[in-house]
Amino acid sequence: MARTASASISSKIGPDERAAAIEALKTKELDILVIGGGIVGAGSALDAVTRGLSVGMVEARDWASGTSSRSSKLVHGGIRYLEQLNFRLVREALIERGLLLQRLAPHLVKPVRFLYPLSKPVYERFYIGAGMALYDIFSWSGGRPPGVPHHRHLSKTQVMRAIPSLAKDAVVGGLTYYDAQVDDARYVSSLVRTASSYGAHVASRVRVEGFVKVGERVVGVKAHDYQTGEHFEIRAKQVVNATGVWTDDTQAMVGERGQFKVRASKGVHLVVPRDRIHSSMGMIFRTEKSVLFVIPWGRHWLIGTTDTDWNLDKAHPAATAADIDYILEHVNKVMAVPLTRDDVEGVYAGLRPLLAGESDQTSKLSREHIVAHTVPGLVVVAGGKWTTYRVMAEDAVDEAVAALDGRIPASTTAEIPLLGAEGYYAAWNKRGKIARAFGVHKVRIEHLLNRYGTLTDEILDLIRSDSTLAEPLPGADDYIGAEVVYAASHEGALHLEDVLARRTRISIEAWDRGESAAPVAAKLMASVLGWTSEETEKEVSNYLTRVAAERASQLEPDDAAADRVRLEAPDITFGFDEDDIKIEADQGGAPKPGEKVEEPAGAPGDKPKKS
């Protein structure tokens, strides 16, 4: 079918699609422009475009490069919020959990079983059991089955049989319950592709550096394409600010502090090999500040998280030696054989955007979200949690369309699955046949189906045309070359870091954090993106420097020292040589050639600097 006759644009967001999107952003007045390519921004773009609106979305860095790729990777109601009597938030999240599991993304969102260990025999079992019964009831309250089994009580013997790694004196019994987990970064990139397939114009590495106003009304933004150096304006009837921990900074560019404040809370997670903890399920433990999760993650465990205030660089939050020691200390309280630093394969830190007063402790701040029309033409959505992104997006778009002319349809995203979801169960049932047809192990097909769903066919087409793409990447056997090529051609990956840190999770799962995979992956990307040998080497060098800086920062004792060391690595800002770029004087207030450019204070993301 010719593109002009199609109801969608493209399921790819490769280089050509990015160029077309930027051309549309420059030349059309949009109904809605979304700033921020995390989970809420991507959800807002999909919500708006599926209501029949013309939509654009820009992201200063890579899709999900901030909070949305550094979470606990859980889709959950938040059992600890029951104790805070936040029943509305828990119920809302559990309804969304069931929707994600069964309708929107069954290929990406999977059930996971957790143990809540008991240290007191009677009262604690009754107290926690009552909370989990309420958890189960809320999960049924959305008009559809929850998609996971209900909770169960276990004796000490049953607990020790299921989790031999627990110290025998650590528990007197336990309760098990189910939540769900997701590769957060992969979900976001799939969400972006889905929005694009319905007609949204999406472009990463495009930074908003100011707002365009007519009187007091926001009518667009001033944008900077990091890949080409071009400055241009994007016009829109309504702009949605979904920049998470950068919300206050973005608001400052329009001259408004905003009606609320967003505080950043740092959460650190450790990655350890699966064989270091013998358990058939995940675990959740209470700490003096919050809770600690031990989460099964393929051939690994994720252990976290911390919950501390962060006031330093938002793009690259750094884990410290103290963070790592804190997590190890708390998990070792219940382990028969303690974990050590030598067991840690990877470490990652992320920032939660929490609604706050001026002096609240981060562990007490709200996980509720707020939507507000702070100035005419500009809607801000902030706060919330990953699991309820769809509700946040719906509320944000509702607020935006209230200011548009005409009758705009209600949200339809509760019935719109992500790309790769439709037909997933049928594909899963014939995974053995697919494996035999392509001469690969069935486990490999299962891996691909749980990452791409029915889009696995597109990965297999690459292997059919070049059998060497079926080979695993060095030091990262879970991933194959075809996935790197596909990330660049179909998933919007523009730099090596995008692939190793987000399209795959090699940067946290591999013992060497992707050092051996980097040269091979870079060459595969070069074939798609047209990099020269010099550019390819630069991508590898930048990535290796990033890894070294992260490792070094994790040896520092405090946040300030860790932040300083982490920022010694060059950041990816420009995909061009600034000395060779000539910017036309009439491009939306762009500087004349040779004119010094002053960066706007408080702009979200990193300030451009030559890598």
Image (tube, rainbow, N blue to C red):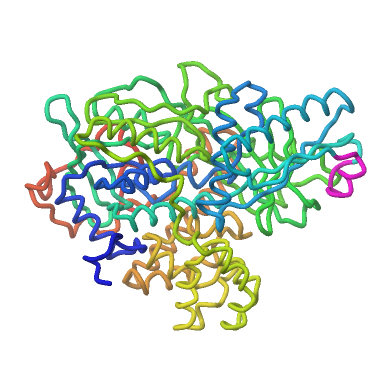
Instruction: Tell whether 556 sits left or right of 370.
Output: right
Task: Give the number of marks.
Answer: 0
Quarter of the image where the N terminus is located? bottom left
> What segment carries the magenta color?
154-167
Q: Residue placed at 61% from the left, 39% from the top?
A: 76
Q: Residue placed at 12% from the left, 49% from the top?
A: 594
Residue furthest toward the front? 143
Q: Residue placed at 37% from the left, 71% from the top?
A: 526
Please state the horizontal and vertical placement of residue 263, each as a whole percent of the image: 46, 26
Name the quadrant containing residue 397.
Answer: top left
Q: Residue 430 versus residue 553: which sits nearer the camera?
A: 430
Instruction: Tell whether 110 sits left or right of 128.
Output: left
Q: Is residue 590 above or below residue 451?
A: above
Please state the horizontal and vertical placement of residue 135, each as a whole percent of the image: 67, 33
Q: Residue placed at 53% from the left, 51% from the top?
A: 103
Instruction: Tell whether 237 sits left or right of 194.
Output: left
Instruction: Tell whether 481 sits left or right of 435.
Output: left
| Residue 555 on the magenta segment | no
Name the quadrant containing residue 8.
Answer: bottom left
Residue furthest toward the left? 586
Name the quadrant containing residue 213.
Answer: top left
| Residue 159 on the magenta segment | yes
Please state the horizontal and vertical placement of residue 502, each as a whole percent of the image: 48, 55
Q: Residue 60 versus residue 568: which sits nearer the camera?
A: 60
